[in-house]
Image (spheres, helix red, strand yellow):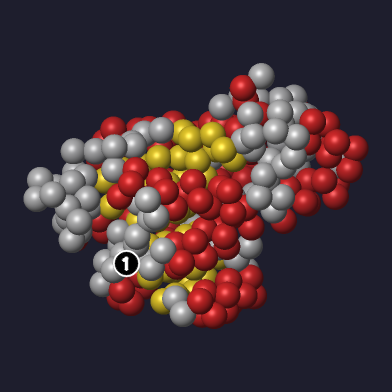
Amino acid sequence: MAEDFTGKAGIVTGAGSGIGRSAAIGFAEAGAQVVIVDVDEDGSNATKAMIDQLGGEVICVSADISQEAAVEKMVAETVATYGKLDFAFNNAGIAGDIVPLIDYTEELWDRVIGINLKGVWLCMKHQIRQMLEQGQDANGDGNGNGRGAIVNTASVMGLISSASNPVAYTASKHGVIGLTKSAALGYAEAGIRVNAVCPGYIMTPLVAGVFEKHPDRKAQIVADHPIGRLGTPEEIAAAAVWLCSDAASFVNGTAMTVDGGYVAH
């Protein structure tokens, strides 16, 4: 069945491009009121224009999710505009450099972990607080179920690893899956579902940047996907929208791979 987010409001981080942009559009197409969050204001405005053309309800919030004050403001602006927070897709992230572990700088490590892992923790901290405060939504069952749904972007590199992948990125995405499972168990009884989506290599600006720096890797990476191609942002967005929807009401604490079979071999 088609997902219906009519009357629901939610946040999508990293929505200025790639997976986040496709997800923001997907939520809007399903009837949601969408809060686009990104540090790239031009990218956010471009995503907003696309949703405006669809007749959707959307606002932009500029926020560095590695900073708690910015995350608090993001949630507060969502509630001030739409009165509540029903779902969130915590998708913002960066790759970092592909260099040996012993050559990785503390500055780069802190930046990658700060956005990819700390940022997800901060987002969930304030999103869950808001969901708990507002109680169950209109689709709840009267027993506290239906307070909200959160999806975090992890990666296939949160499930496996490779010597040729950025070490901080791999560590951060393993951390996102652990954080997701911990939150899922901690708030299930309160009616808040928390899941992660684990993309394979997707043709986004982030992956394009990796290929630009390391063009010799592209052919092998494509070959590592048994389906014979890289994924599209729309394919990951569809998974995130479904996981946030009532159709996934019995899905909690999972790390869903959307990877063309990458981790199956």
Lateral position of residue 138 relative to residue 41, left or right: left
Give the residue drawn at x 29%, y 43%.
249
Residue nearest the observer in this picture, 255 or 239: 239
Q: Is residue 46 above or below residue 180?
A: below
Give the residue drawn at x 83%, y 39%.
218
Farthest residue, direction right: 216
Give the residue drawn at x 18%, y 46%.
145
**How many C-alpha atoms fall within 10 Å of the one at disc 1: few (<14), some, or many (≥20)?**
few
Give the residue drawn at x 41%, y 76%.
57
Classify residue 261 by image quadrant. top right
Q: Is residue 46 above or below residue 183?
A: below
Q: Is residue 147 above or below residue 223?
A: below
Lateral position of residue 111 relative to residue 197, left or right: right
Lateral position of residue 263 relative to residue 129, left or right: right
Farthest residue, direction top: 265
Residue 51 seen in this snapshot: yes
Q: Report the quarter where the C terminus lies.
A: top right
Residue 170 seen in this snapshot: no
Q: Mark 1 sits on what residue?
A: 6
Percent x, y of residue 245: 35, 51
Farthest residue, direction left: 142
Percent x, y of residue 67: 48, 58
Classify residue 219 by image quadrant. top right
Q: How many marks?
A: 1
Three-letter amino acid code at disc 1?
Thr
Residue nearest the observer in this picture, 237 or 59: 237
Residue nearest the observer in this picture, 166 or 141: 141
Lateral position of residue 216 relative to residue 38, left or right: right
Q: Is residue 224 above or below residue 246?
A: above
Secondary element under disc 1, as helix, strand or loop, is loop
Percent x, y of residue 8: 31, 65
Farthest residue, direction front: 1
